[in-house]
Image (cartoon, rainbow, N blue to C red):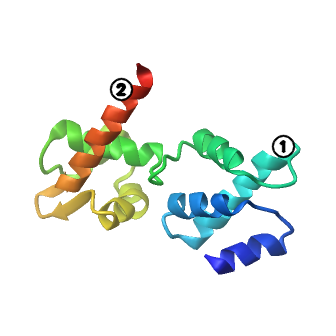
Amino acid sequence: DALRRQGVRMLGWEFDEAVFRMIAVRSRGVPRWSLRLAESVWRTATAEGASVVRADHADKTFDLEGIDGHGLTKMDRDYLGVLSELDGSVRLNVIGTRLRVPVQSLVKQVEPYLVRIGWVTKDDGGRRLTPRGVEQLRSQAAGSEAEAS
């Protein structure tokens, strides 16, 4: 984290400390993602004529890129939605077909993070939501309903 901060500062970019935390959560601990997100947030700030990158610039960037507070992308949320909808163990090829995405994309880009954070488990029967994943989806759905009211 300190190395990334130093790298951003070496580029001459001025960031509020809160922005680094926001980027860290959404980059999933992947250094190249954190740099890409930092660049995107910086571009948003400079497009608005700001000299310091603030949290509101980060929020706007993450909204534009469809990255939520847990670091989930639209594809991640769609994947979780398929598992929730089909309820139980779901074969990978079924998920890929439902999402119209190559299975290898799911294996390389989506599943590793969802498994690491404990929301999805893989077994011989396929993929399934963990109790933690089910609870998280419920709390997100409740939050979405509250925002809509």
Q: Nearer the viewer, residue 104 or 43?
A: 43
Q: Nearer the viewer, mark 1 or mark 2?
A: 2
- In this figure, which residue is indicated by the disc labeled 1? 47
- Residue 126 appears in the figure: yes
Question: Is 8 drawn above or below residue 42 in the view shown?
Answer: below
Q: Spatial distance from mark 1 to mark 2, Cα to Cα? A: 33 Å
- Mark 2 lies on a secondary structure that is helix
Q: Position of residue 142 (x, y in %)?
A: 31, 33
Q: Amino acid at mark 1?
A: Ala
Figure check: 122 above or below 145: below
69 left or right of 43 in image: left
Q: Residue at x 35, y 61 (%)?
A: 107
Residue 33 rendering spot, x and y as whole percentages: 59, 64
Instruction: Answer left or right for 148 relative to 130.
Output: right
The residue beneath circle 2 is: 145
Residue drawn at x 53%, y 70% as measured from the top left? 30
Number of other residues with Cα within 10 Å of mark 2, as a class: few under 14, some 14 to 19, many 20 or more: few
User: At 66% from the left edge and 45% from the top edge, which residue is drawn?
Assistant: 61
- Residue for point 16% across, 56% down: 126
